[in-house]
Image (spheres, grey):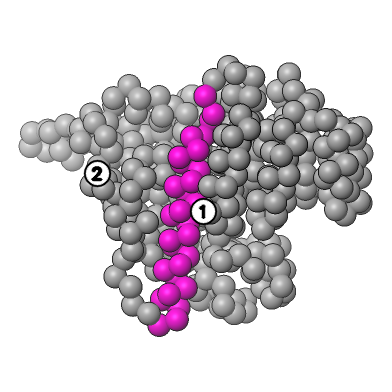
Amino acid sequence: MRVAIIGCGKIADFHVQAIHRIPEAQIVAVCDRETLMARQLAERFRIEGCYDDVGEMLRAAAPDVVHVTTPPQSHHALGRQCLDAGVHVYLEKPFTVTAAEAQSLIETARRRNLQITAGHNYQFTPEMVEMRRLVKQGFLGGTPAHLESYWSYDLGDISYVGPLLGNPNHWVRQLPGQLLHNIISHGIARLAEFLDDDIVELTATAHQSERLRSLGGQDVMDELRVLMRDRLGTTASFCFSTQIKPGLNQLRICGPVNSLTVDLASGSLIRHVSGSYKSYLTFLLPPLISAREHLRNARRNAVSILRQELHQDAGIKELIARFYDSIAGRGAPPIAPREILLTARLMDAIFAQIRSRHLDATPTGTRV
């Protein structure tokens, strides 16, 4: 599998490191319009091809698949250029700026019989993979009744948010959802996996934290709360916050019989099994059962560390490997196009509602 990377910033390092752990993959080229960026990445990882023009790279390096790790405003154009050249495409999150752009790329890939995926790597950590296995086996006792997704970001390190706040022309500031737009797709995507395409109600509110205001936050919002319901009656909530401590990165799936909580911060999957207990056992057995679940996770993670199987970038490596397998015809795409498009549609609706509220409108909820 001949691989090329467009965009040689910090995130490209994670892609290179993950690809290097996939035996059948070889990185043949990197490209960035800033020649020095492409050169430093190529030199550090001993990659032969180094380009500052995408068209030239596609012609000269002839990659099978391209990873696009540039700012999202360029994703649609670059993705289309690669697809038109007959190349499979991995687009970093957010997949595109709008749902219309996402639909366009997905349809183009389908027409050309090519694979395309989104960089939702947190969907493929070991605990998320195990969660999916349990759901498929029927652990919930039916379809999910309610979903909760939490995603937090720490403003303690201002190396990212500082330049963003200091430059009104920063590319993040130019996104419809600004800071939120660049971060929340991970948390929204894991809801989209279990929601029906027809979202009959969505209510979103956003505001700026006191911490961000103290840093000179201007018009950037960093607190978001979303409630939604699909046509089948499944409800979902999403919370993004820079103020929750300790930080939360969780998904809770509530079923008609049992429930699951995935904690990506600790690499844990907690099984919540229904049960009724007599008398004071109600106050004794549930905590003990919960403790057993945490010990089970600790033991599994310890074994994985000792076997050198647990990596910080486990999710991105697993996603990339599954994507390459789908290109080779060894499996289905790791993320269904339906989920990519629904994630984009939900984000469009969230940011439209935030803008509407910011302009002093008072929507009561929208249909997606």
* Residue 329 rendering spot, x and y as whole percentages: 60, 18
| Secondary structure state at the residue bearing disc 2 | loop
Judged left or right of residue 153, residue 224 is: left
Foreground pick, 73 / 145 = 73
Magenta span has 358? Answer: yes
Foreground pick, 319 / 251 = 319
Q: Nearer the viewer, mark 2 or mark 1?
A: 1
Residue at point 54% right, 20% down?
Answer: 331
Residue at point 60% right, 40% down?
Answer: 108
**Residue range corresponding to the magenta coloring:** 332-360
Q: Residues within 10 Å of mark 1 (few under 14, many from 20)?
A: many
Q: Amino acid at mark 2?
A: Leu
Give the quadrant of the N terminus: top right
| Secondary structure state at the residue bearing disc 1 | helix
Judged left or right of residue 98, residue 85 is: right
Residue at point 91% right, 51% down?
Answer: 35
Foreground pick, 131 / 308 = 131
Q: Amino acid at mark 1?
A: Ala
- Residue 113 lies, with reference to residue 254, above or below; the image says above
Q: How many marks?
A: 2
Magenta span has 158? Answer: no
Is any atom of residue 322 visible in this view? yes
**Residue holding disc 2:** 232
* Residue 330 rendering spot, x and y as whole percentages: 58, 17
**Residue furthest out toward the bottom:** 360
- Residue 206 lies, with reference to residue 241, above or below; the image says below
**Residue holding disc 1:** 99
